[in-house]
Amino acid sequence: MRKSLIAGNWKMYKTTKEARDYIHELRNADWDVDREVAVLAPFTCLTVFHEAREWSRVQYGAQNMSWEKEGAFTGEISPLMLLELGCKYVLVGHSERRQVMGESEEMINSKIKRALECGLVPIFCVGETLEEREKGQAEKRVAEQIRLGLQGVSSGHDLVVAYEPVWAIGTGLNAKATDAQEMCSFIRQALGRMYDQKWAGLVRILYGGSVKPDNAGEFMSQDDIDGALVGGASLDPAVFRSIVNY
Ligand code: PGA
């Protein structure tokens, strides 16, 4: 049984004060025990989640990390620093990091391996561009991202994959739930071929891209969609709360 995961990706929004207010807003929020709620916060806000860990039910993690544990890497954050602040998750390979920061498949692969080695759960993002979809290359592209991203990774780890079609991120144009299901099922089958069916059946696969309170339920009702990665709609705690309680 896969526990569903609703993860908010705050991107480069919120100061520590705003993060503190947000966590307090969610303090009395109620959601089913079979549902896990997480926030992927800016590095500077992680300490706020750490301080609230005794009473807050919200899991948390970072949006990026270095593939090295320490060293002369100015401006980078080590997985060990994330662990010290109690992070459970780390987002790896988000399309904004691929496209804006120029992250390569090789960097993404190194980050996934390091995260797993250190005991962080990577939320590994994959997804095709509009051009790739229009050319009928969506599955080919996603299969390639999965293959390259997981090179040298053994099965059995706690891993989350997020299918986020690039054209649906921050555009208000969400994928159709049935199309997202098709791709998530394709990803699960690919994992089953690369590894084993048993593990593929345990990996949680999320959909991300313009998830809102009014479409969350439809995505979540699909067999191979185990949760959502929510950007813009996670910034307001009341809106996020209604997605969590889809
Ligand atoms: P969005 O972003 O929900 O604003 O489309 C999703 C994401 O970037 O993870």
Image (cartoon, rainbow, N blue to C red):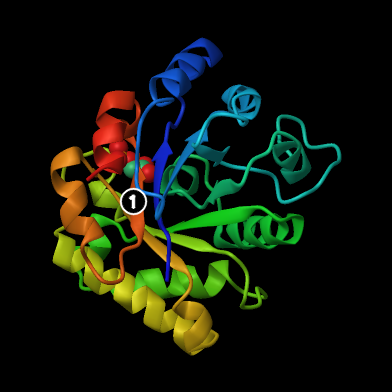
Whether ligand 1 has any atom under 8 Å from the Cβ at mark 1 is answered as no
User: Can you identify the residue that label 1 sits on?
Assistant: 228
Q: Which quadrant, please, contains the N terminus?
A: bottom left
Residue at 22% x, 66% y: name it.
222
Q: Is residue 15 above or below residue 78?
A: above
Taking the image as shown, residue 50 lies to the left or right of residue 83, namely left
SS at mark 1 in the image: strand
The amino acid pointed to by label 1 is: Ala
Q: Is residue 129 above or below residue 27?
A: below
x, y (%) of residue 239? Answer: 25, 29
Looking at the image, how many numbered discs can be counted on the residues? 1
Taking the image as shown, residue 97 lies to the left or right of residue 108, namely left
Q: Which quadrant, please, contains the C terminus?
A: top left
State whether residue 143 appears in this view. Answer: yes
x, y (%) of residue 20? Answer: 51, 16
x, y (%) of residue 21? Answer: 45, 14
x, y (%) of residue 142? Answer: 38, 69
State whether residue 174 appears in this view. Answer: no
Q: Is residue 111 above or below residue 18?
A: below
Determine crowd level at label 1: few under 14, some 14-19, many 20+ residues with C-alpha closer than 10 A.
many
